[in-house]
Image (cartoon, rainbow, N blue to C red):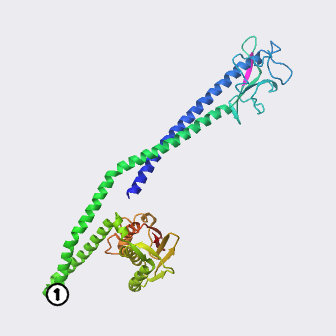
Amino acid sequence: MLQALGRRLLFSYLGVMVTIWGTSTTIVYHFLSYNLYQKLNSEIITLANAASHNLIAAPVDKKAINTKIPRILDNDDDGDLDIPWQDLRENHQGVEWFDANGRLLAKAGTTISRMSFTANFDISQHHKIRSITIPVYLHTLTGRKKKLQGYVRVSESTEELEEELNRVLWGFELGGLIVIILSGLGGWWLTRQSLQPIEQSIQQLKQFTADASHELRSPLTIIKTSVEVIMNYPDRIHPANVNKLEAISSASNQMTRLVEDLLLLARTDVVKSTQMIAWINIPLDELLEDLVEFLELHAVSKEITLKLEISTEVFIKGEAIQLKRLFSNLLQNALHYTPKGGTVIVSLVKLERFVVINVQDTGIGILPEHILLIFNRFWRADQARNQREGGLGLGLAIALAIAKTHGGDITVTSEIAVGSCFQVRLPLAS
């Protein structure tokens, strides 16, 4: 329980940290990307406005736009466009001039858009080239009318910007990995610190349960023995007290079973090395055969078919009394929850290092939401209460505790109105 709680706390902490990191990284990345693209847009708009002067100067200066189409514009033959602050070759930019009919007049620079000319004045992105097209108007002498002179399209490569964003994203990913690792270590340490008081309380509760169970055994034994002695002399018992004595006897028997079960659970919570040293090799196949034979009469009385399917000899190391209690609880549960005419099958599969024992029935089944709860102490479903009276809700908890004490585990598969299968996995004797 503590391990499951610790994992849940750790994963919750990591989930919150990853969510915060992912959200903040996404916001910062998109904000940075937006600003860089806005800066790029400003650059190409500024360049387009500057390059429009070449097209405006064409009616006055015939050299502004050479009629030999297309050719690179360079009026000074110095390798630069006639825009002093702009170096198109170094910045991977390009400028194209078009007349009013959309016919290419000239171009300059290293990055030229491959898109066909369209009078679309919005910024567009094609592959890794960002472009803008602006109209260029020539004012008449009156200044009231404007005449369309042509168009200027400016393009700039976004490769460097995307590479920069990729480097930033890679840095975020590397930083995120470091954050997750450090958060995991910190969360693990915090979880251990927060669970220490709970663990101490549980240990104290276990100790109290063991001590209380041990101390209750003596008075319960005295009560049970005294009632049995009195009932051995029925002639001395007033008829009106017979039912009362029977009730006391039944209650004392139930309390004795409860105390024994709690004491067993308290002892199996912590496995001592001396107990493991005292374990011996046990023929599991013979133990199951004896148990099935013992419960055969009970199965016959309920008209249930009890089968044993074991064809191999299997030895495991452990304590025979506890292992018998484990499988007895599982078989009794199967018999109690299997209706008249049903079947209970005990089978065994020997693997390389483990042995798997299946206790399968055609009983009432278990609801999916109850499967994780059936091994809790004192837990019983309402349907189970109606089917079986007098149970204490500790049988499966004891079975799981014994299995874990012996280095094994129990898993369950079930379907309502079809049946259940309890699978016990135990290590083989070396």
Pick the front one: 418 or 394:
394
Q: Residue at x 52, y 43 (%)?
A: 177
Dominant SS type (magenta) = strand
Judge whether 416 appears above or below 63 on screen: below
Judge whether 182 appears above or below 301 on screen: above
The verdict on residue 91 being magenta is no
The verdict on residue 135 being magenta is yes
Q: Position of residue 60 (x, y in %)?
A: 80, 12
Q: How many marks?
A: 1
Residue identified by numbered label 1: 234
Please identify the residue farthest to the top as the structure is shown. Answer: 141
Left or right: where 151 falls relative to 363: right
Q: Position of residue 2 (x, y in %)?
A: 37, 56
Pick the front one: 281 or 405:
281
Q: Amino acid at mark 1?
A: Pro
Q: Secondary structure at mark 1?
A: helix
Looking at the rendered image, the quarter that the N terminus falls into is bottom left
Left or right: where 381 falls relative to 348: left
Please identify the residue farthest to the right as the structure is shown. Answer: 68
Q: Position of residue 382 (x, y in %)?
A: 36, 69
Q: Residue at x 65, y 27 (%)?
A: 41
Q: Residue at x 42, y 46 (%)?
A: 187
Which span is picked out in magenta? 134-138
Q: Position of residue 93 (x, y in %)?
A: 72, 26
Left or right: where 134 falls relative to 306: right
Using the rendered view, name the quadrant where residue 256 is placed.
Answer: bottom left
Left or right: where 312 falls relative to 156: left
Using the rendered view, name the quadrant where residue 71 is placed.
Answer: top right
Please identify the residue farthest to the bottom as the structure is shown. Answer: 235
Pick the front one: 388 or 231:
231
Q: Is residue 96 visible?
A: no
